[in-house]
């Protein structure tokens, strides 16, 4: 985006909760209406700020999970025990409530539509949120490898199935369950390893770009494995989620 647009992105502005959607027992998507919102690039995030009646303020960063579009965006929030912001967003916020946001933010971990290379998206847990925006906006071959503990912990299950079915082969989704697999699942629960990654990754000659998002240990391991199987390190982009979900 143009440098002149930066000050506007760094200004807090009101956002109205238009709707909420439960993703799991501990995660929720909030649909936000923002006057003057012009859209985002898949992979970007926003800061969300809450103000208590006594004036105390707290803010956290959350990835945008919706496809780009004007006037409205979606953020998907995983509740963090003892968190200052996420418990309110997941358990309390309701349509009509007003929050404050600033953004969109981020220029590295983004999937620009002009980039015609195939994409490999690797998400761990709630790290799939910014990748969901990339899936929804995909116009080029896109493969998502999603590691989650169990079916009940998986985000966007219905939306991912819809995107894969409607993509005409453009979008492929592979899930790996680390603790509990669905009945009849062809593979036993396991952590992502080099073999699982090699089955999904694009061949080296495809010059694919990879996006990896999740907890720090997960991201570092996946980035190393991608290099081990032949991916160019300059084509690997990573985003780490801290304990606050920011």
Image (cartoon, rainbow, N blue to C red):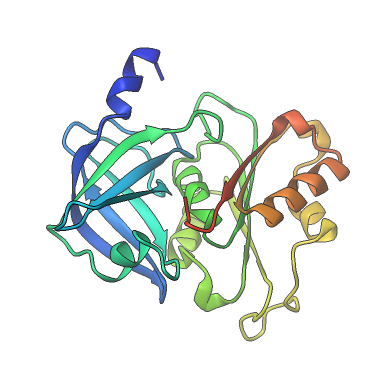
Q: What residue is at 75 percent from the left and 62 percent from the top?
A: 192
Q: Is residue 97 left or right of residue 213?
A: left
- At 70% from the left and 56% from the top, the residue drawn is 217
Q: Quadrant of residue 85?
A: bottom left
Up the image or down, 210 lies above or below 194; here it is above
- Residue located 82% across and 36% down the image: 204
Compared across the picture, whether 236 is left or right of 229 comes to: left
Residue 141 coordinates in the image, percent (x, y): 61, 40
Quadrant housing the N terminus:
top left
Indicate the position of residue 89 as horizontal and vertical percent values: 30, 62
Query: Nearest the camera: 169 or 202?
Result: 202
Q: Residue at x 16, y 61 (%)?
A: 95
* Image location of residue 171, percent across then percent down: 57, 49
Question: Percent position (x, y) of residue 143?
Answer: 63, 48
**Would you say residue 229 is visible in this rendering?**
no
Q: How many marks?
A: 0
Q: Can see residue 109? A: yes
The quadrant in which residue 14 appears is top left
Which residue is at the far bottom?
Answer: 183
**Vertical arrangement, residue 105 with respect to residue 136, above or below:** above
Q: Examine the rendered structure and indicate whether residue 126 appears above or below residue 60.
A: below
Residue 80 left/right relative to 180: left
169 on left or right of 84? right
């Amino acid at each position: 985006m143009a440098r002149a647009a930066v000050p506007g992105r760094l200004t807090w502005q009101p956002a109205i909760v238009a709707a909420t959607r439960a993703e799991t027992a501990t995660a929720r998507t909030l649909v936000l209406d923002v006057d003057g919102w012009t859209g985002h690039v898949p992979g970007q995030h926003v800061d969300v700020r809450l103000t208590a009646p006594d004036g105390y303020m707290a803010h956290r960063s959350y990835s945008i999970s919706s496809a780009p579009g004007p006037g409205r965006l979606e953020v998907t929030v995983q509740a963090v025990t003892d968190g200052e912001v996420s418990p309110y967003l997941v358990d309390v916020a309701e349509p009509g409530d007003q929050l404050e946001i600033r953004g969109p933010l981020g220029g590295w971990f983004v999937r620009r539509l002009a980039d015609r290379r195939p994409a490999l998206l690797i998400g761990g847990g709630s790290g799939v949120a910014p990748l969901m925006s990339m899936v929804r906006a995909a116009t080029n071959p896109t493969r998502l490898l999603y590691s989650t503990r169990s079916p009940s912990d998986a985000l966007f299950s219905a939306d991912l199935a819809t995107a894969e079915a409607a993509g005409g082969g453009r979008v492929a989704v592979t899930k790996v369950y680390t603790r509990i697999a669905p009945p009849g699942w062809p593979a036993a629960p396991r952590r992502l390893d080099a073999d699982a990654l090699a089955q999904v990754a694009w061949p080296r000659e495809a010059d694919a770009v990879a996006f990896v998002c999740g907890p720090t240990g997960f991201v570092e391991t996946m980035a190393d494995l991608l290099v081990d199987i032949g991916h160019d390190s300059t084509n690997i982009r990573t985003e780490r989620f801290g304990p606050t979900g920011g």
